[in-house]
Amino acid sequence: MTNKFIEISEVGPRDGLQNIKQIMPLEVKKAWVSAEASAGVPEIEVGSFVPPNILPQLADTAELVAHARNIPGLCVAALVPNLIGAENAIRSGVHKITIPLSASETHSLKNVNRTHAQMIDEIKNIVALIKTIPEVDRPKFEGGISTAFGCTLEGKIKTTKILELAIALMDAGCDEVGLSDTTGYATPSHVVKLVKAVKAEVGDNNLTSLHIHNTRGLGLANVVAALDHGITTFDASLGGIGGCPFAPGASGNIVTEDLAFMLDSMGYDTGIDLKTLMKVRKIISNALPDEPLYGFTPDAGLPKGYPNAYRD
Ligand code: ZN
């Protein structure tokens, strides 16, 4: 019997780097992406198609996509905030596009200066654009509901609001929806409640991914809760880099290395070779020596007898 495959989507080059002031040179980014793909990471979100004056750290996303597309078998993903971003993403040749829709309208207005209705209109325009591409070349298009577990401005977001947005995203023509714990507010019980509720509305196959931050140390606990409820893709960042600029000391996404170790030890297949993966950290620490790298497994080392003793 083969083990169930759980996909780890590396988002460090996007979510991590956008929260770090220092700009990582393109050549280093290329080396990072290549090294992680060689370690078996199946999907990497390499950047975001936003104007360079807003996020200069990600200004070379198109070049990085061009590089990553040459890596056999790798799914190359990028974030877009609007139609212009989607046009640029499509031109670059990404395999997957995610657009964040903030569940908190206050956050949406502050972040992208758009109401929910305006965002849904923009998403419809992106779907129309994607439909002009021959079917075999179309990127996958995900609507990611950000601040789904709570917002630093609005606090808790009502489940009914999340469901309403999930339905609106599917109706607008997204291939699937995702849930993002942008603020690190999620807890295991909240994850279960929301995943079940959204799946019940949009269908089991249309919510398969979760974007989790480890701000309050509950990242992996949230993964375990979600695994039991049909989530099969988890975003994570190598060394948990990034953090949140509004919460000093708070770590960023869940740590790719710890997530890979946990899934592996639970008997899931991630396709990742952990020893090779852990060596990739060097690329980041050499380029960003002042950035803290997180991760319990890399700090402690792999247990004696790993992996065989850990799989029985
Ligand atoms: Zn994030």
Image (cartoon, rainbow, N blue to C red):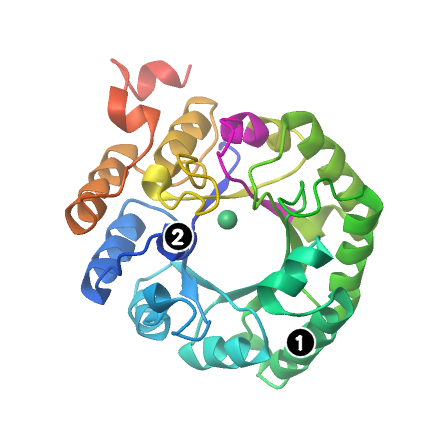
The local secondary structure at tag 2 comes to loop
Helix, strand, or loop for circle 1? helix
- Give the x, y percent position of residue 270: 43, 38
Q: Which mark is residue 75?
A: none
Image side of residue 250 versus residue 24, left or right: right
Residue 19: assigned label: 2
The crowd level at tag 1 (other Cα within 10 Å; few <14, some 14-19, many 20+) is: some
How far is disc 1 from disc 2 in space, using C-alphas?
A: 29 Å
Amino acid type shown at disc 1: Val
Question: Residue 152: which quarter of the image?
Answer: top right
Is 49 situated left or right of 142 in this image?
Answer: left
**Number of marks in the image?**
2
Q: Position of residue 27 (x, y in %)?
A: 19, 64
- The residue closer to the viewer here, 77 or 2, is 77
Q: Is residue 53 above or below residue 232?
A: below
Q: Answer whether residue 142 is visible to the viewer in this image.
A: no
Lower sequence index among marks 1 and 2:
2
Residue 159 x/y as whole percent: 80, 42
Q: Nearer the viewer, mark 1 or mark 2?
A: 2
The residue range painted magenta reads 208-223
Q: Which residue lies at the image location 29% right of the left edge and 49% below the top edge?
A: 36
Q: Position of residue 256 (x, y in %)?
A: 38, 38
Q: Identify the residue under disc 1.
A: 127
